[in-house]
Image: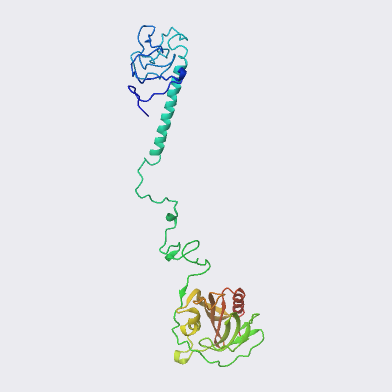
Amino acid sequence: MNEHGGGQGPQLPDFSAPGGGQSGAGRHGPGAQGSDGYGADAQRPDGQSPGGYGATGGVGGASLPDFSGSPSGGSGRTGGFGGDDPGRPAGPDSPGGSGGGRGPMLALLGGGGCLVVILAVIALVLSQTVLSGGGEEPADDPTPSASSPTDETGPSDGGGASDGGGASDGGSGGAPTPKDQEPTTEAAASGTACTMQGDGAVTEQVEGEVRGGGLAFPQPEGWEVGTGWGSQSAYVTDQHHADQPVEAGWYTLAGVGKVEFPEEEGGYPGAEEAARAIFLCALEPEQGEELYGDPAMLRNYRDEATTVDGHDAWIVSADVVISDLTLLHSTDSWRRVVIVVDTPDGPAAFDGGAALGHDQQVADLETMLEGLTVL
């Protein structure tokens, strides 16, 4: 706000002055004599000149009370709270007459409004300084807020939200990983020669069932039975299969047969080692490199003891990832199950599978395992 000459800072306008006149502390300054509006010096009834601010303008014009402590002790204008003789009421003809009653009230209201404004300014300053942390200056490089996404997740090296930089649900930078799939592990080498045996003795087949090596399982609907497959499982003879097509040129097989390990390899190692060898030999580069890659990648790997029809057995199973999806379009992995059972006539094995994504085929595999019996 601008500073008036000779005054003590900004002054409020006189809203009671007729004709738009204003009271002024301006040109006279503190302690100057007031004007009665006609140019004559105003005198108090006791003959003393009133102190305080002089008013210029129309008749009865009022100025702000004099808080400067002038010797007169009055408000500094005629007709104010201390300006008239206490025994003489102010009238219309007296100095400060007709406007004398309203002037002090307006001045008081004006002063109260100024006080309210000052208190509001003080409250605003306090709210911006004390209540908001003392008005500290912001840092040159503002840090993200606690609610920013950076604080909650953090960027990964690969630009996604998953570990190792790979993409996850809702993340960027690649296809999302299916939630229902386990992490893959590399298949170990079999550690054996993966010897392929001849056909040996042939078990007689019966309708509705597949038999071989002293084991049998039910033949599901839609599966064909035969022995004309060019490859057998490693270390298995007398093997008979049921098969079902997956897509052009590819079939899934399930078979049973007799387990035989050559004496030069140490003979039969037991159900546990035999089951692992038969399972892993099918994944060796010579057997499964075209389909599975080297090394083969496994999900849901299972390797544990079990029982079949009351006989001790060992199961090894996993979902084997297909490495070349140009070969197969309706599945991306193959479920393989090998069970070696110690039967009264010697060890026998079930070796079967199903293409994941072909739900009926997977269900048929479960039916075979549940119906596996010892002859």
Q: Can you give x and y, in whole percent of width and height, for residue 235 in the image?
A: 51, 88
Q: Quadrant of the C terminus?
A: bottom right
Q: Closer to the camera, 45 or 183? A: 45
Circle count: 0
Q: Closer to the camera, 215 or 93? A: 93
From this viewpoint, is residue 116 visible? yes
Q: Can you give x and y, in whole percent of width and height, for residue 283 in the image?
A: 48, 81
Up/down of 312 relative to 43, above or below:
below
**Horizontal placement of 73 versus 254: left or right?**
left
How are the colours assigned in the image?
Answer: rainbow
Up/down of 285 relative to 359, above or below:
below
Q: Quadrant of residue 111?
A: top left
**Image point (46%, 92%), residue name:** 263
Q: Can you give x and y, in whole percent of width and height, for residue 333 in the image?
A: 53, 75
**Horizontal placement of 17 versus 140: left or right?**
right
From this viewpoint, is residue 276 visible? no
**Image point (42%, 54%), residue name:** 151
Up/down of 51 relative to 253, above or below:
above
**Horizontal placement of 32 versus 302: left or right?**
left
Q: Quadrant of the N terminus?
A: top left
Q: Quadrant of residue 78?
A: top left
